[in-house]
Image (cartoon, rainbow, N blue to C red):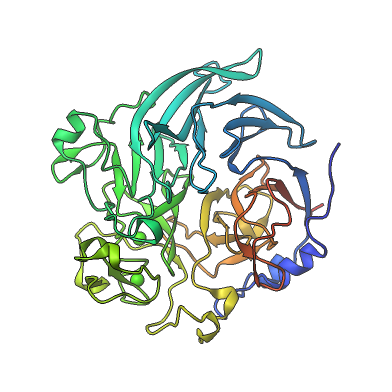
C-alpha cells in the first residue's frame, strides 16, 4: 500500500521559503517553488546509509545498524531482504559503524558478474576494523551469499569512517575513508593521519593502516590498479588524500569524480577528485585562505591528556598552524565550501555571524552524500548538477556544473527542507523522483531552525516527485 503521507505539514511551502541561504544563494528561490510532490515511500529502516537505483528497477538500500541490504519497490515501498551481514558491528554508541556503502557490479543482471560489494566495520579482538566483501546475488532467490573478502584490515574508528563505495566508468571501485575523527572530542589526542602515505614495506605486508583520510581506488578483486598514482615513490590503493570525512562520491558523465566532505566548524566541501591530489586536511579546511580555521594539533601538545578539547578555543600548549603557512604542490582547493566564514567569525554565537549569516547559516551543513543529476533529467533547473544531502539542515543542495564539469556555476539551490537528517539519495532513470533516506536519530533543526533531536521521519525513504511538466 502506497503511503502518500505528508512528510511535514506544509512541507513544500516551508521548504521553499527556507530555500535560500544567506544573501548569496537566492537565485534558485523561485525555481524551488516549482511543483514537487513529497511523500513517504517506506519506514522502519534501521539507519539507512546508502541507496541506489538498481538494474532491476528496484531501490537497493544498506542499513547501517540493521546490518543488511534490502530491495525496495519504488512504487509500493515493499521491502525484500537481500541479505544480512552478521559480522558487521554497529556500535550503538556511534553513528559511524556498521554496514555503510555498497556497490553493485556494473555488469549486474547483464549476463556478467552479479556481485554486490559491501563496505562494513567489524571488530577483531575488540579492535575496530573495516573491509570490503563481495557477495554473489542469486537471481532465483533474489538473495546474496558466498561472501568473499576483497580487502581487509582497513582502519576503522568510533568517528568519521567515510564509507561511500562506488564503481567508476573504468570499472574500478572507489572507497572514501575518513580520518576517524582524530584530534577532536574523545579522540583529541590521536594524530590525524590524512597526510601520511603508505610505505613500500606497508604495501608489501598488506598493512593498510595509512588508509585513513583517503579515497581509495581498487580493482574489483581488491588488488592495486597498475595505473594508480605513485605517491612519495609508492603505488598503493590511495587515489587522493588529505581528506577529513568524505561521505559522498559520484561520477559525472565524462568520468570526472566528485566528493562531498565534512569540514570542522566550517568549510564542508564539494571536491573534484584528481588522481594523486592532496585535499589539504588537516592543514587546510576549504580554501587556503586563513578564514575561520587554524590547525591546532592536540597530539603534539606535551600534556594533551590534561587539556580540555574545545572546537573553538585552543588551549595554550597546543601547536597552531595557519593555513597559509602550509602548502603542497598537489594541493587541490574545493569546488565549493559550505561555508567559509570571515576572519574573526564567532563560532560560539552563530547569531553574531554578520554578513547575512544567521543560525541557519551555521557554517557547516553535515555533507553526507553527493549525486550527479544528468543533463537528460526531466527537472530543467537541475540538469548537469551535483546534488548534496545535508544531515544538519535536512536539505538537498543543488550546485550547477559548468560545461567542462571542472567548476560550478551560479548559486547553490536548497530544496526539501524538513526536520530530518538526509543521509543519501538516488534518482529514477527519468530523473523525476528523488529518493532520500533519513537517519533514525541524531540532531538537526526543527521548522523554526531550532536544534532538535526529534526526527519527523526516522529511518524512512522520502520521495520528491517533479510534477512541473505533468
Ligand atoms: Ca579540503
Ligand atoms: Ca580555509
Q: Horizontal placement of 153 versus 443: left or right?
A: left
Residue 360, by quadrant, is: bottom right
Q: Residue at x 35, y 29 (%)?
A: 152
Q: Horizontal placement of 463 versus 103: left or right?
A: right
Q: Position of residue 214 (x, y in %)?
A: 33, 47
Q: Position of residue 304 (x, y in %)?
A: 26, 64
Seen from the viewer's position, the closer of residues 376 and 373 is 373
Vertical position of residue 389 compared to residue 448: above or below? above
> Does the image show residue 25?
no
Vertical position of residue 350 compared to residue 461: above or below? below
Vertical position of residue 153 compared to residue 255: above or below? above
* Residue reaching furthest to the top: 140
> Does the image show residue 327?
yes
Q: Residue at x 52, y 51 (%)?
A: 370
Q: Quadrant of ligand 2?
A: bottom left
Image mark count = 0
Seen from the viewer's position, the closer of residues 435 and 3 is 3
Seen from the viewer's position, the closer of residues 320 and 75 is 320
Q: Horizontal placement of 404 versus 383: left or right?
A: left
Q: Residue at x 27, y 36 (%)?
A: 208
* Residue reaching furthest to the front: 306
Amino acid at each position: 500500500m502506497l503511503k502518500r503521507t505528508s512528510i511535514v505539514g506544509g512541507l513544500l511551502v516551508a521548504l521553499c521559503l527556507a530555500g535560500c541561504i544567506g544573501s548569496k544563494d537566492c537565485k534558485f528561490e523561485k525555481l524551488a517553488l516549482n511543483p514537487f510532490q513529497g511523500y513517504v515511500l517506506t519506514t522502519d529502516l534501521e539507519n539507512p546509509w546508502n541507496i541506489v537505483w538498481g538494474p532491476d528497477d528496484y531501490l537497493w538500500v544498506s542499513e547501517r545498524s540493521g546490518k543488511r541490504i534490502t530491495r525496495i519497490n519504488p512504487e509500493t515501498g515493499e521491502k525484500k531482504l537481500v541479505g544480512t551481514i552478521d559480522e558487521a558491528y554497529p556500535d550503538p554508541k556511534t553513528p559511524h559503524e556498521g554496514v555503510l556503502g555498497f556497490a553493485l557490479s556494473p555488469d549486474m543482471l547483464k549476463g556478467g558478474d552479479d556481485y554486490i560489494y559491501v563496505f562494513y566495520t567489524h571488530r577483531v579482538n575488540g579492535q575496530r576494523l573495516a573491509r570490503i566483501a563481495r557477495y554473489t546475488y542469486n537471481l532465483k532467490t533474489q538473495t546474496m551469499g558466498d561472501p568473499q573478502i576483497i580487502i581487509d584490515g582497513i582502519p576503522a574508528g568510533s568517528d568519521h569512517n567515510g564509507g561511500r563505495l562506488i564503481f567508476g566508468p573504468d570499472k574500478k571501485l572507489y572507497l572514501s575513508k575518513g580520518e576517524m575523527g582524530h584530534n577532536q572530542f574523545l579522540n583529541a589526542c590521536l594524530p590525524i593521519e590524512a597526510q601520511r602515505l603508505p610505505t613500500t614495506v606497508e604495501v608489501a605486508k598488506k598493512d593498510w593502516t595509512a588508509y585513513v583520510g583517503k579515497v581509495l581506488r581498487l580493482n574489483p578483486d581488491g588488488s592495486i590498479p597498475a595505473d594508480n598514482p605513485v605517491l612519495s615513490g609508492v603505488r598503493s590503493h590511495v587515489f587522493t588524500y588529505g581528506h577529513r570525512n568524505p561521505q559522498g562520491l559520484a561520477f559525472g558523465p565524462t568520468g570526472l569524480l566528485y566528493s562531498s566532505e565534512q569540514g570542522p566548524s566550517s568549510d564542508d566541501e564539494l571536491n573534484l577528485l584528481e588522481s594523486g591530489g592532496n585535499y589539504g586536511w588537516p592543514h587546510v579546511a576549504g580554501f587556503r585562505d586563513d578564514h575561520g580555521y587554524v590547525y591546532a594539533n592536540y597530539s603534539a601538545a606535551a600534556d594533551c591528556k590534561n587539556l580540555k578539547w574545545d572546537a573553538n578555543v585552543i588551549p595554550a600548549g597546543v601547536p597552531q598552524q595557519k593555513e597559509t603557512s602550509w602548502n603542497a604542490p598537489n594541493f587541490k582547493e574545493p569546488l565549493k565550501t559550505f561555508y567559509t566564514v570571515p576572519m574573526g567569525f564567532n563560532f560560539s554565537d552563530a547569531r553574531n555571524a554578520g554578513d547575512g549569516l544567521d543560525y541557519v547559516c551555521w557554517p557547516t551543513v553535515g555533507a553526507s552524500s553527493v549525486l550527479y543529476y544528468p543533463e537528460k533529467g526531466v527537472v530543467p533547473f537541475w540538469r548537469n548538477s551535483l546534488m548534496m544531502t545535508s544531515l544538519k539542515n535536512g536539505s538537498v543542495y543543488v550546485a550547477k556544473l559548468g560545461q567542462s564539469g571542472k567548476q560550478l556555476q551560479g548559486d547553490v539551490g536548497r530544496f526539501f527542507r524538513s526536520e530530518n537528517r538526509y543521509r543519501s539519495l538516488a534518482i529514477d532513470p527519468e530523473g523525476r523522483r528523488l529518493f532520500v533516506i533519513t537517519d533514525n536519530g541524531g540532531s538537526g533543526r526543527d521548522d523554526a531552525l531550532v536544534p532538535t533531536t526529534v526526527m519527523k521521519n526516522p529511518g524512512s525513504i522520502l520521495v520528491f516527485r517533479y510534477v512541473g511538466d505533468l
